[in-house]
Amino acid sequence: MSVKPIPEGYHTLTPFLTVRDAARAIEFYEKAFGAQSRGIMKGPDGKVMHAELKIGDSIIMLSDEFPDFGALSPQSLKGSPAGLHIYVEDVDAAFDRAVKAGAQVEAPVMDQFWGDRYGRLTDPFGHK
């Protein structure tokens, strides 16, 4: 049996997030962005070793922190050099849901000169 170069349902690029308290992060992404869980694998200690969520037509992967393996969250690193852009049909409603679910507003939603209606938030786990 041959291995598929790109698994069914994935795109060429799939982000992987390391978070502190992955179970809570999964709940946040479900409430804030309508994420659907595609599977969660926990280790013997109950920590999430690997989870897959689908937001719209895209998949993100995430896990708890595992410092012994160099997997640290933005909270441990005191910030993150990366961010995720999420395109949705109704940015105002999605933004409001995310704020109600616990995200912090960095920049309110506004029409931008480049043509997007855009805002910035930081989720409760340090990802922008």
Image (cartoon, rainbow, N blue to C red):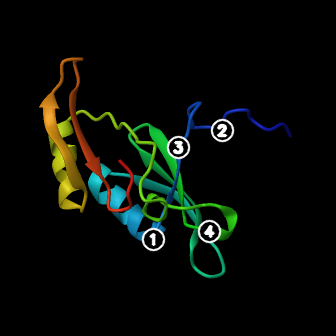
Compared with 58, 31 (above or below) is below
Q: What secondary structure is marked by label 1?
A: loop
Q: Where is residue 74 in the image (x, y as percent from the top left)?
A: 45, 58
Q: In this view, does 113 lie to the left or right of 71?
A: left
Question: Label 2 sits on what residue type?
Answer: Pro
| Quarter the N terminus occupies | top right
Q: In which quarter of the image is residue 27?
A: bottom left
- 3D distance between C-alphas at marks 1 and 4: 13 Å
Q: Position of residue 52 (x, y in %)?
A: 53, 54
Q: Mark 2 sits on what residue?
A: 7
Tell us which disc is closer to us: 3 or 4: 4
Compared with 101, 87 (above or below) is above
Q: Mark 1 sits on what residue?
A: 21
Q: Is residue 13 left or right of residue 29?
A: right
- 3D distance between C-alphas at marks 1 and 3: 18 Å
Q: If you read the primary sequence from the N terminus, does the residue marked by circle 2 or circle 4 appear first?
A: 2
Q: Quadrant of residue 25?
A: bottom left
Q: Mark 4 sits on what residue?
A: 67
- Give the residue drawn at x 18%, y 18%: 113
- 3D distance between C-alphas at marks 3 and 2: 15 Å
Q: If you read the primary sequence from the N terminus, does the residue marked by circle 1 or circle 3 appear first?
A: 3
Q: Quadrant of residue 110?
A: top left
- 3D distance between C-alphas at marks 3 and 4: 19 Å
Q: In this view, does 77 lie to the left or right of 90?
A: right
Marks 3 and 4 in Cβ contact (< 8 Å): no
Numbered circle sitting on residue 15: 3
